[in-house]
Image: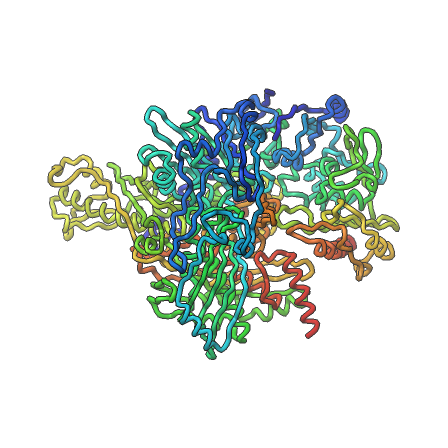
Amino acid sequence: MYAFNYSRAETGRKAVNLISKNEDAKFLAGGQTLLPTMKQRLASPGALIDLSGAADLKGIEMKGRNLVIGAMTRHFDVATSELVKEKIPALADLAGMIGDPAVRNRGTMGGSVANNDPAADYPSACLALNATIITNKRKIPADEFFTGLFETALEEGELITKISFPVPNKAAYEKFRNPASRYAIVGVFVAKKGKDVRVAVTGAGSNGVFRPSNFEAALTAKFHVKSLEGVSAKAEGLNSDIHADAAYRAHLIGVMARRAVAKANAK
Amino acid sequence: MSATSSATGIGASVRRKEDLRFITGRGQYTDDVNRPGQGYAFFVRSPHAHANIRKIDSTAAAKMPGVLAILTGDDIAADKVGGLICGWMIHSKDGSPMKAGAHPALAQGKVRYVGDHVAVVIAESLAEARDAAEKVEVDYDVLPAVVDMNAATKKGAPVIHDVADNNTVYNWHLGDKAATDAAFAKAKHVTKLDIVNNRLVPNPMETRAAVGDYEPGTESFTLYTTSQNPHVARLVISAFIGVAPENKLRVIAPDVGGGFGSKIFIYAEEVVCVWAAKKVGRPVKWTADRTEAFLCDAHGRDHLTRAELAIDESGRITGLRVHTLANLGAYLSTFSSSVPTYLYAPLLSGQYDIPAIYAEVDGIYTNTAPVDAYRGAGRPEATYVVERLVEVAARETGVDPAKFRQKNFITKFPHQTPVIMAYDAGNYDASLQKALEMADYKNIGKRKAESERHGKLRGIGISAYIEACGIAPSAAVGSLGAGVGLWESAEVRVNPIGTVEILTGSHSHGQGHETTFAQLVSDRLGIPLDAVSIVHGDTDKVQMGMGTYGSRSGAVGMSAIVKALEKIEAKAKKVAGFCMEASDKDIEFKDGKFTVRGTDKSMDFGAVALQAYIAHKFNGQELEPGLKESAFWDPTNFTFPAGVHICEVEIDPETGITHIERWSAVDDFGNVINPMIVEGQVHGGIAQGIGQAMCENAVYDAKGQLVTASFMDYCMPRADDLPSYQVGMTQTPCPSNPLGIKGCGEAGAIAAPPALINAITDALGTENVPMPATPQAVWRLAQKSITRKAAQ
Amino acid sequence: MPKVSMTVNGKAVSGNVDSRTLLVQFLRETLRLTGTHVGCDTSQCGCCVVHVNGSAIKSCTTLALSHEGSTVTTIEGLAQDGKLHPMQEAFRENHGLQCGFCTPGMIMTAVDIVHRKGNKLDEQTIRHELEGNICRCTGYHNIVKAVAAGAEAMAK
């Protein structure tokens, strides 16, 4: 790691104040992606503002028909929350598949969403559940939030404070893991709310998380595995690496989508 | 020998003596060693696979905070520090010696792989050393690189070492070409396979580390290092690299966190740390990060092989022909030359009676990390060739693979193969039958049908492996080109109150020597296990030794202890004789008691030890006081553990995920001292073999960048990738050592890959399954398999 | 250099650290608690697992300064009053270690699994929960046995 200045913020507001005074600073949430990147000297923020003590950024609650989760809520807390398991079990499921137990004890929803790693899990949930990302400045629909590889709609110094998930009728997440890193090679989140069906794919797209419209159209007609017969993803625009080329990823999108629909319907 | 003479003796699954410190966090690994005033080393490494160094400018770096020194190849050359060596001479077919290019500890004008050592920065802290290293300006003239073996030997390929034309280190061969060609000419059936043995990174969980220290008052050096063989490290650093004479160089390998071969070798970083300690006037510490381990630890395997098996009308194997390209990387590592030659081709007979074998091996330089011994070293590669060929041959000739093997097994011992080895003992069919039973082989058809009903593909695969281990016979290995004999030493120090220290030249880095060796001594001397301590890993304590690799420490190291114990017993009998006024010839030693034969006069071991040191009952002219003996053991032959592993898999054709349903292993290790430890060795070996076959793969891109340089891309098998293993044993004692034991450390890694691949090929109905059989690869083949079945 | 204070293995400790000091470096280098190991740079291997405020985390992927006021338990603090923790005993009894390097992280993870999943653990659960800990020696067979046995023993 390169040297940096460290400060702690006890509240979200203080964190935003601190960062406004230091344009070279970054927020440190759980650090499970940022710190390894810094250890490899691939990132060199001049200062870190540690959010781990900001209690106002934590917590899980229902607000109206939405499940609202604080940005600094740890994956472990999402995975084990009775409220999440009751309202959106697929989200608890997904949180329980991130990294490993020790990573889940540190990593946070806000950190993951803000980082928008193309192989991260949460972006698919945000997109498929039509979540709203709430920052210190505004509310951003998920459809507008994820703008590219490690790119989001967040502006300099803007802090995610919470994420609001409309509770779906049915939802499920299926993940095919990279055998080495255990990140998603393909993760598919399907959600049905009223007549709307949304599908989001992570891990596969060369531009990050995306919604395959043909899958959504087929499932909107009928939310059933059979609706996906003959529906496939195109390899074009998908990632290729030593673990999975684009054609394999395209195939896996279909498999994971079918399994996710079956899982959602089984609940 | 008694099977189990006591709860802690030979044959007992004693819990390990070394564990207390490990489970409480009190182990002392090299990175846990800190010397007062130590500086931290960080190496400037080549980002290019092949380049000339025009200039190194460290002016800016030297001004960075905390920097103590920046040293380059010029400094190493000025101090006449010698290069790293390869200690095993291989001669080509034409009699010419192998073409070994220079291997400097810090680059001399040229770098040959990504990670090659260019300079070292030593600073007050590691962070400062690393900050400064980024300011070292190296002006590279980048050259074209070659990573592919076939490309490397083509005309016009980049020249990696001027001494090696066509980047070829040697064109070596073994066996009778004419006889083999004749066998193929007459064959009823010939099975041909192109085989890739994938490149692996050993990855012990502890990365390499070194702390170099220099004491100016005595002009002596100490090197703490992660070594499997500290004495060999001292020998090489002293005699060849010339840092200090042996009496001024102490090498300590404290607790070592796994080795698997990768810590046998003498590497640049360790040499630089000990040399720099004097140069800088401060102890120098270096610990590899995991990426450095990936880039610079010697890798394993990496063969391309064309293999053919000749079979007569009765289904007997009549000939085996093999041509292998072996990637040796950019430099010859310490034992690299021997791995694809003498540790490989002599095992190509497998467990089979094959009258004619001919093997050609071309050792090739590429712009990749050096390749050397990794768990099994040559023998997994041989077993993979043989067991894939045999499996395919059986299927092609329509014979059950188990029966095909059985028919071709060697049944009479000793057996001279056409490729050097004389197998001393074994009962291959016994292991096969037991494994078939454990695997419920006869009902596999039902289980396959059941899987098919659920849309899954099930397969079963056999691997009947043999290995030559207990790497030693000095004359034998010498005649094959080894620079030193590979005997082992032991010293038994009996203390006045009858406790015992055993000094061994072997080194434990997970194998449990502190327990197994103590069991042997406790058993032989009739003293409690706690009264025995094993001392190893320090050249100031143990005079000389050859270290631990090649599954040799039991067969060779413990045999040396036996020999020293025999001397102790003889001497103790003399002391007992004096004390009990009898001739030593009339003294019997049993269960820790010296008894005058035919009388009830006796002394226990502790009493005799005490009298040996009090020395009142005899005078020094009659008998030397004290009770301490040493011995060197050089066996007459290798040991030949062999066995059969059977793997059963179920494949999800939709995703390509292979699930290992059952693993049945039967190994013949001869007599066993501690079954718990031996089984643990088998488990670990199988896991590494499964890793090779299913997920591990070191990949370089065309420019020589290592694509898999961390655990993010190099797939290490994890707990949920692996099954529990059923482990069974058969026992034919080894006649070549006094304990009748054979090596067990590498067996699993040797046996496992063909068992797993044979199972996958069985499930998919195609032989063309590569290692590693990743989900992607298996999925593609499964699709073809389903299409093919549909067409039928 | 900023100062950090925390409770480690029941003792109040503090030290001045560079802001980039990781928790594992603070433990190993400042406190000389070298039982916690580093086996990788990418948060994969789990050799560095310690408990912070009762949860297992990877001490190589967190800053020392983030743990001001925290309660940390390392492998050295697991045995109480000279008596081994049941999970430590189970690893020894079941030969759940060979070279010992991954062992501290394995044991700390195993104890955390029991805290979260209870004392009756089946093989599949154990293997899944050990996802973030790599062992190169044992092939996991005996680690899985040790965790199951240790979990049961912890109920007593």
Q: Which residue of the protein is positioned furthest toward the bottom in this rendering?
A: B313
Identify the residue at horizontal 67%, vertical 70% (top origin).
B788
Q: At which x and y percent is residue B546? A: 35, 46
Based on the displayed image, in which of its 4 quarters is residue B531 positioned? top left
Q: At which x and y percent is residue A81? A: 72, 40
Based on the displayed image, in which of its 4 quarters is residue A113 positioned? top right
Q: Nearer the viewer, residue B538 or C71?
A: B538
Q: At which x and y percent is residue C56? A: 60, 37
Identify the residue at horizontal 59%, vertical 58% (top origin).
B773
Q: Can residue C31 be seen in the rendering of this structure?
A: no
- In this image, B548 relative to B155: left or right? left
Q: Nearer the viewer, residue B342 or B724?
A: B342
Q: At which x and y percent is residue B210? A: 45, 35
Q: How is the image coloured?
A: rainbow
Q: Nearer the viewer, residue B645 or B157?
A: B157
Identify the residue at horizontal 54%, vertical 62% (top origin).
B195
Q: Can residue A33 be seen in the rendering of this structure?
A: yes
- In this image, B457 relative to A203: left or right? left
> Quadrant of the image for the N terminus of chain A?
top right
